[in-house]
Image (cartoon, grey):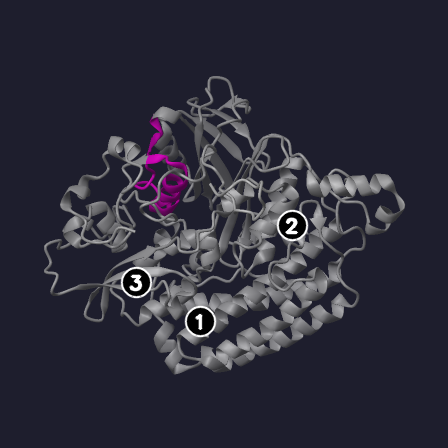
Amino acid sequence: MTTGVRDTSDVGRIGIDDQLTAQTGEGGQELARRRQTTPGELGREIGAVLRLPEGPVLDPTSIDVERSEDETMIINMGPQHPSTHGVLRLMLELDGEFVLRTKPVIGYLHTGMEKTAEELTYVQGATNVTRMDYLSPITNELCFSMAVESLLGVEVPERAVWIRMLMSELNRISSHLVWMATNGMDVGSTTMMIYGLREREMILAFFEKTAGLRMNLNYVRPGGVAADLPDGWEDDVAVICDTIDARTYEYDELLTGQPIFHQRMEGIGSLTAEEALALSVTGPLLRSTGVPWDLRRSMPYLHYDQVAFDVIVGTYGDNFDRYAIRLNEIRESIRILRQVVQKMPLGDYRAQDSKVTPPPRGRIDASMEALIHHFKLFTEGFRVPTGEAYQAVESPRGELGMYLVSDDSAKPFRLHVRGPSFVNLQAVPLLMRGGLMSDTVTVISTVDPVMGEVDR
Amino acid sequence: MTVSTAGTYPVTVGVGGETVGYVARDGYVAAIAELKACGYELCADVCAVDYLGHPGRPLPEGIAPERFEVVVNLLSLSKKERTRIRVQVPEDDCVVDSLFELYPGTEAMEREAYDLMGIVFRGHPDLTRILMPEDWEGHPLRKDYGVGRVPVQFKEAPGPR
């Protein structure tokens, strides 16, 4: 990797011919010194996102580029920093204790999952996508399966739809619990760390009972889900709901009313609704600015239009709002879960479409045709008609979108994933501008990036 | 297949019920700006597709298929609607204008499309590689870029790429 000082001739490097011919050296990814940066890039690094006539517009051309390097310093935070939640690397320009510019440098976990998806059949595809956002695997599988189903035109049975809702809400709770835990850790509360992971364990145990795995479930598949819910699932879910609901009030006592916690969270990392929309930010980050945008409510998928729940919004767009939104979303998810348990219909857990559904296990031993069918389905897969589909679901971090292109073969021609963490990370320079170095930790935490999804 | 109300580009309806517009490369930013003025506040996604080896895809009349396609997914919070804009980008001149001035949030997405697919976005403030290392050669998501393989320890097995 090329390091070192970029020379000033790089400044006008938007020369297109040069970029097309040169295969290497498009430019450094790191935070450069002010004089060696284009005004546009400089503006982005200080978080000047708005080009609006009104509002507090920060003009990148008014930045003091000649500022002496003795006054500021550029430091590296990560990629191996415990508070960066994975392998996120931030380059910060500091003036003493204050952050002037920030640049997230990502890609340390890039494993080419979009390329891998083109090599796997649709049957195998869910196994791949479930590893992207490893804290909410169900959401990934759900998005992928719904995109495939919309191209196939397969109807999913009612019970499968409700099982999918049950599992996604459990997953949302477990994802938010990990967030509560790590956020508690970031502000110094090791108790919260233990509490969050303790409660999450209940949900992972239920996942194991249902799908056989704790994390990368491969449970939601095109056509339905992999298995029916285990016997006594209603009691398990009721216990999970009651326990976690009661314990969210313990978190209230531990954190919400805590003066130190308030000082670390309130008024720090503020975002306005205009800035959030301009930066394409979604999820709790967007809702914290007061925009009531939740895909479950605004553009309902599955049967979210048949359950009652509230969309939690904030007012100030600061760290504390984002904390409060996630805590209350746990309670709303519990509310949805209780309704799902009541409304769960009987019936099939996967579509009886022999094109996408393997034959039942019992028939494989009895029937040669069923064995051949099973074998063909898992070796060759099924063909999906030519077309394109964009499917979006509300992941715990925001809008998770998948753009699927099919060419009438058994493998996706192209699968593009719009990771909410990847997009939300763009708000970090803005949230950190002018803040204290120590607040960077809480800001990264409340943006809640999952690096598996950022880098894919 | 109908023609949009503005009468400038053909539109179809996607599988999810969203509007899909097919815009020429020259009028791309203007068309997006017009949609932004119509209430599409948020640019959900920008990505590129390499159609090498899949030229016969259905496109409306008057749209010549090219190797690359830049796909922009816009979201209107007020109207609760999605619109997708597809732009054909030829292989020998894969340059489109950047949407950065309209939607600053496309910055990382365009960098990703450049990094993995080699589409150059004119006017982007910092068009560098984002996921691959900065000295990487080639654009991995292109169809003519190999997947690579793990060497297998058998005598006749093909070696590493």
Looking at the rendered structure, the secondary structure element under dot 3 is helix
Q: Position of residue A368 (x, y in %)?
A: 86, 41
The segment highlighted magenta reads B93-120
Q: Earlier in the sequence, mark 1 or mark 2?
A: 1
**Which residue is tagged 1?**
A183
Viewer-proximal residue, B88 or A370?
A370
Q: Position of residue A250 (x, y in %)?
A: 54, 81
As measured in the structure, the alpha-carbon distance from the residue carrying label 1 to the one carrying label 3 is: 17 Å
Q: Residues within 10 Å of mark 3 (few under 14, many from 20)?
A: many
As measured in the structure, the alpha-carbon distance from the residue carrying label 1 to the one carrying label 2 is: 31 Å
**Which residue is tagged 2?**
A302
Identify the residue shown where x is 22% and y is 39%. A13
**Which residue is tagged 3?**
A432
Left-right relation of A55 to B47: left
Look at the image and tell me whether residue A55 can be seen. Answer: no
Subunit that carries the residue with mark 3: A
Looking at the rendered structure, the secondary structure element under dot 2 is loop
- Say the numbered circle drawn on residue A255: none
Q: Which amino acid, by three-letter code, is at mark 3?
A: Met
Identify the residue shown where x is 31% and y is 45%. B135
Q: Position of residue B65 (x, y in %)?
A: 47, 22
Identify the residue shown where x is 20% and y is 50%. A59
